């Protein structure tokens, strides 16, 4: 400490008093902190410890069946026995909540990663009729799988390299029966309610 390097002769009496007061204040602070820690560890004086009661007959909220979910990472290249896996997942029929499972369609959280040269962000209109190369393909492939498995879709939105206009067009394509692109493809509405940003 700075003062410890000075000889007592160099310290005026007022400095010495300040130095002693600083130590006393520090000691008081330490005592207060230790007292608080002891009171927290022992509980509040005069009160009984809290009791936690779990009553399984009381339902606070319904469980969601969407905890059963799978992720489709766009093109399933290299996936062995994909048809068998889709059939197995499709056979799962939750008996609680919404009674449907979830099928997530998309890459990363933003689906607009730029840290890999081959990931430019998914632009669904650029992929009509495409089955690759990895990582993107025609969005109708994934939507068809979800329909076959009777799964609720959560669609990842590309806000990494996309635009609000592109997202608006995607929502329209998925849900608007009067959407021009949908009419040209003669598809029923997919009724996608969940979108991930």
Image (tube, rainbow, N blue to C red):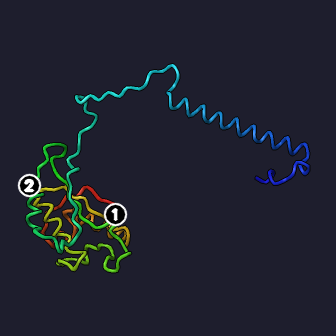
Depth check: 110 or 25 in front?
A: 25
Left or right: 162 in relation to 84: right
Quadrant in the picture for the C terminus: bottom left
Residue at x-position 18% and y-position 74%:
77
Residue at x-position 81% and y-position 54%:
5
Left or right: 148 in relation to 164: left
Depth check: 103 or 165 in front?
A: 103
Nearest to N terminus: mark 2 or mark 1: 2
Q: Is residue 149 above or below residue 79?
A: above
In the rendered structure, find residue 13 and report the number of the disc placed on it: none
Where residue 164 sits, quadrant-wise, is: bottom left
Q: Are marks 2 and 1 in contact (CB under 8 Å)?
A: no
> Whole-percent x and y of residue 113?
36, 72
To which residue does mark 2 refer? 91
In the rendered structure, find residue 109 and report the number of the disc placed on it: 1
> Whole-percent x and y of residue 147?
13, 60
> Whole-percent x and y of residue 135?
25, 75
Element type at mark 2: loop
> Whole-percent x and y of residue 72?
21, 65
Residue at x-position 23% and y-position 68%:
73
Residue at x-position 25% and y-position 73%:
124
Where residue 187 sits, quadrant-wise, is: bottom left
Q: Is residue 67 above or below residue 60?
A: below
- Real-space CA distance between mark 2 and mark 1, rounded to the nearest whole angstrom: 27 Å
Depth check: 179 or 64 in front?
A: 64
Q: Residues within 10 Å of mark 1 (few under 14, many from 20)?
A: some
Q: Is residue 71 above or below residue 161?
A: above
- Farthest residue to the top: give it: 46
Element type at mark 1: loop
């Amino acid at each position: 400490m700075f003062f410890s390097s000075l000889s007592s002769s160099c310290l005026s009496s007022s400095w010495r008093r300040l130095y002693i007061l600083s130590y006393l204040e520090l000691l008081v602070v330490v005592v207060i902190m230790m007292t608080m820690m002891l009171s927290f560890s022992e509980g509040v004086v005069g009160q009984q410890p809290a009791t936690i009661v779990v009553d399984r007959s009381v339902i606070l909220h319904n469980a969601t069946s969407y905890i059963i979910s799978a992720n489709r990472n766009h093109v399933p290249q290299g996936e062995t026995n994909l048809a068998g896996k889709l059939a197995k997942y499709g056979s799962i029929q939750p008996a609680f909540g919404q009674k449907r499972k979830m099928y997530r369609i998309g890459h990363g959280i933003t689906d607009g990663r730029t840290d890999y040269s081959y990931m430019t962000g998914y632009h669904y209109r650029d992929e009509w009729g495409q089955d690759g190369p990895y990582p993107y393909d025609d969005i109708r492939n994934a939507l068809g799988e979800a329909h076959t498995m009777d799964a609720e879709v959560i669609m990842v939105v590309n806000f990494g390299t996309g635009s609000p206009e592109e997202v608006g067009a995607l929502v329209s394509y998925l849900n608007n029966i009067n959407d021009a692109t949908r009419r040209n493809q003669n598809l029923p509405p997919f009724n996608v309610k969940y979108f991930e940003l």
